[in-house]
Amino acid sequence: MSSKPSPKRRAPEKLKSAPARGVGAKSKGAGEERGIAEHETEELWTLYKRTAKSGQQTEALQEIRNELIERHLPLVKYIAERLLQTLPRSIQIDDLKSAGLFGLMDAIRGFDPSRGIKFKTYCTTRIRGSILDQLRSEDWVPRLVRLKAGRIDKALQRLTSQYGREPTHAELAETLELEHGELSKELNDATARTMFSLSEKWEDHDEDGGGEKLEILEDSSAVDPLHELNRQDLLKFMTRSLTHKERFIIEQYYAVGHTMREIGEMLSLTESRVCQIHSNVMSRLKGLLGQKRGTLLL
């Protein structure tokens, strides 16, 4: 008689997949058997403080801290965007987020759940303060000037509300107990100033995306080619009737920029003699220009 093969035994369901024992799945308590991401925020704070007090599980502490940071990143973005609305356009949102992230990490290190304060309330102040500290460190205007500007602005608003019009300079100076000159100086120092990046591009909708502001910035120290050509032509016209020595003195003094002493050394003349020749030439040229003034583009 043939015997049928016995069916294979199956493993019990509870032994199919054993839970991984990692940082977030310890056997110390029922609350720690879950993963880090599965904890509520309040439970995560309790676990974080207990892990920090032990001083042994550095990897676990870092994992919990990273989870807390990720959960509150939207708050950092929200605070940075709110502050950006009151700041100049030269301020970048990424710089505010970076400063706010440092404030969030400081808040995590210094937060004490036993005080009964919610972490969101606590870290909001720290994030905002960190961003403002970063902005103050990059501000080129002294903080005292900012305080004086705020004092003037408050007095201006109060007097405007009181009189129903904008106060005069004398009324504002009397309220602030300042002299007219001191008030004028503080008003000038408090004038809003904005920095712009020369590498910033113009908002152009062309295919090239527009050029940088540096490309169209006027160089006040550059020489105007048309003006330079006119000056050279005028110099040739005025010196064409002069001798070689006189023309050399005028060109070296006005075109090159040499001193009378240097010109005298080149011509083997004394400085006083060069000055004398220069004076005689200038007197003759003034008379010549007086006669030709109507025909020259001066």
Image (cartoon, rainbow, N blue to C red):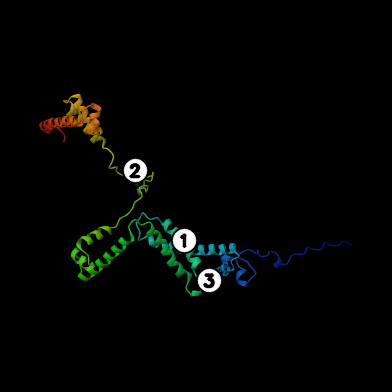
Tag 2 secondary structure = helix
Q: CA distance from mark 1 to mark 3?
A: 22 Å
How many residues crowd around disc 2 within 10 Å: few (fewer than 14), some, or many (20 or more)?
few
Q: Position of residue 252 (x, y in %)?
A: 23, 31
Looking at the rendered structure, the kind of residue marked 3 is Glu
- The mark closer to the camera, 1 or 3, is 1
Disc 3 + disc 2, Cβ < 8 Å = no
The residue sitting at 40% across, 59% down in the picture is 134
Q: Position of residue 216 (x, y in %)?
A: 32, 43
**Label drawn at residue 139:** none
Quarter of the figure that contains the N terminus: bottom right
The residue sitting at 41% across, 64% down in the picture is 129
- In the rendered image, is residue 229 in sight? no
Q: CA distance from mark 3 to mark 2?
A: 55 Å
Q: Earlier in the sequence, mark 3 or mark 2?
A: 3
Q: Count of labels shown? A: 3
Tag 3 secondary structure = helix
Q: CA distance from mark 1 to mark 2?
A: 37 Å
Q: Position of residue 86 (x, y in %)?
A: 35, 61
Disc 1 + disc 2, Cβ < 8 Å = no
Looking at the rendered structure, the kind of residue marked 1 is Phe
Residue linked to disc 3: 42
101 or 253, nearer to the observer: 253
Query: Residue 227 is drawn in which quadrant?
Result: top left
Looking at the rendered structure, the kind of residue marked 2 is Glu
Tag 1 secondary structure = helix
Residue at the far right in the pictured view: 1
- The mark closer to the camera, 1 or 2, is 1
Residue linked to disc 2: 215
How many residues crowd around disc 3 within 10 Å: few (fewer than 14), some, or many (20 or more)?
few
Residue linked to disc 1: 102
